[in-house]
Amino acid sequence: MIPLKDENPTRIFPFVTIGVIAVNILLFIYQLSLGPGYERFIFAYGALPYEITHGVDIGPQVQIPLFFTIYTSMFMHGGFMHIIGNMLYLWIFGNNIEDSMGHIRFIFFYLICGTAASLAHIFANPNSKIPMVGASGAISGILGAYILLFPHARILTLVMMGFFVRIIKVPAVIVLGFWIVLQFLNSAAAFSSEGGGVAWLAHIGGFFAGLLLINFFKKPYEFSQYQ
């Protein structure tokens, strides 16, 4: 199931959501402009679990504390499909979560969920020297908040099952419930594997961070207004 659009109106203009999307796209364009230096940039500013757990910069060296690469990595992506998928989810679900808590709270919520997601991956892979990049962890936190605040919101969804391809409206609880189950299944399948790929545990960590934190960040009347 691929979400395309939700039918959940907002009351405020999503400045932060659009700003985050813009920063991600601009940084990705910059990454592409580096040519052969693309990989060096990823290893320098991506979050390497080994560097963070051991406090050792294995290079390329950066002029920021190693822990801060958790935040630089949130705005970097590894390819076109990576950034397109992430920005699609951020656009569909981020504006409503920003609306539910306001611009400033949303910024902190986004960064905290991204931090929780990164730490979940680092905890599970403390000796990994493979850089983690992408906004997926922070966006997963948005999905966790969305499923709790707007479970009945209708999501225009592309459903593909073999030759069956339809665009239908599906409740958010089903779309996002399917998504988190898929993260658990993929995480279990990848548990014993080594090497690169998707940081499934980061998605799971971010999602549950969103579930736990939304009550502290949302405006007090949000539940009664949106159910």
Image (cartoon, rainbow, N blue to C red):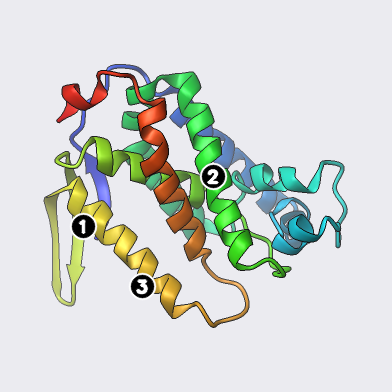
The image quarter containing residue 227 is top left
- Left or right? Give the position of 7 relative to 86: left
Residue at mark 1? 158
Tag 3: amino acid: Leu
Does label 2 or label 1 sit earlier along the sequence? 2
Name the residue located 74 percent from the left edge and 46 percent from the top edge: 67
**Residue mark closest to the camera, 1 vs 3:** 3
Name the image quarter holding residue 94. Answer: top left
Closer to the camera in the image, 129 or 155 = 129
Mark 1 crowdedness (10 Å alpha carbons): few <14, some 14-19, many ≥20: some
Nearer the N terminus, badge 3 or badge 2?
2
Q: State the residue at coordinates (36%, 72%).
A: 185
Q: Position of residue 51 (x, y in %)?
A: 78, 59
Which numbered marker is on residue 185? 3
Q: CA distance from mark 3 to mark 2?
A: 21 Å
Which amino acid type is marked by label 2?
Gly
Is disc 3 placed on a helix, strand or loop?
helix
Q: Position of residue 139 (x, y in %)?
A: 44, 45
Reading the chain from its start, which is encountered first: label 1 or label 3? 1
Residue drawn at (54%, 47%) of the image: 116
User: Mark 1 belongs to which amino acid?
Assistant: Leu
Q: Do the residues under discs 2 and 1 have CB atoms within 8 angstroms? A: no
Task: Please name the residue that numbered disc 2 is placed on.
Answer: 114
Q: Quadrant of the N terminus?
A: bottom left
Residue 120, numbered circle: none
Residue extending farthest bottom: 192
